[in-house]
């Protein structure tokens, strides 16, 4: 089994992502991406995150790689 992708967040990044997840006006796909990164930072596996959010684990991996490369 693969190790979960470990993402470290600063306090500012965490606050901004959490704010995104509470937004009522932000596009649903952006809210989902924010949730993916927050769950990744908690150490959840791609498959677990995908199951919780109802998406494909490959999608989770894609957004984890994008976060690592470019951040917020």
Image (cartoon, rainbow, N blue to C red):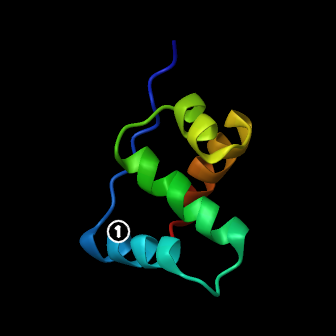
Quadrant housing residue 66: bottom right
Query: Is residue 48 placed above or below 30 in the rendered structure?
Result: above
Residue 68 visible in the current orientation: no
Q: For the point 49% across and 55% down, which residue is it?
A: 37
Residue 11 visible in the current orientation: yes
Quadrant housing residue 44: top left
- As drawn, is 6 to the left or to the right of 70? left
* Residue 25 locus on image (x, y percent): 64, 87
* Residue 20 locus on image (x, y percent): 51, 76
* Residue 13 locus on image (x, y percent): 37, 72
Residue for badge 1 = 14
- As drawn, is 45 to the left or to the right of 25? left
Q: For the point 60% across and 68% down, which residue is it?
A: 31
* Residue 64 locus on image (x, y percent): 57, 49
- As drawn, is 42 to the left or to the right of 62? left
Where disc 1 sits, the SS reads helix
Q: For the point 45% across and 71% down, which residue is it?
A: 17
Count of marks overlaid on the render: 1
Which residue is outermost to the front?
24
Q: For the point 48% across and 76% down, which residue is it?
A: 22
Query: Is residue 59 placed above or below 3 in the rendered structure?
Result: below
Query: Is residue 51 placed above or below 20 in the rendered structure?
Result: above
Which residue is outermost to the left?
11
Which residue is outermost to the bottom?
25
How would you rate the neighbour count of disc 1 (Cα within 10 Å): few for under 14, some for 14-19, many for 20 or more? some
């Amino acid at each position: 089994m693969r190790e979960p992708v470990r993402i470290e967040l600063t306090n500012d990044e965490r606050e901004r992502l959490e704010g995104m997840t509470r937004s009522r006006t932000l596009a649903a796909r952006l809210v989902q991406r924010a949730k993916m990164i927050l769950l990744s930072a908690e150490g959840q596996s791609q498959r677990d995150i995908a199951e919780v959010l109802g998406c494909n684990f490959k999608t989770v991996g894609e957004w984890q790689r994008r976060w690592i490369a470019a951040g917020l």
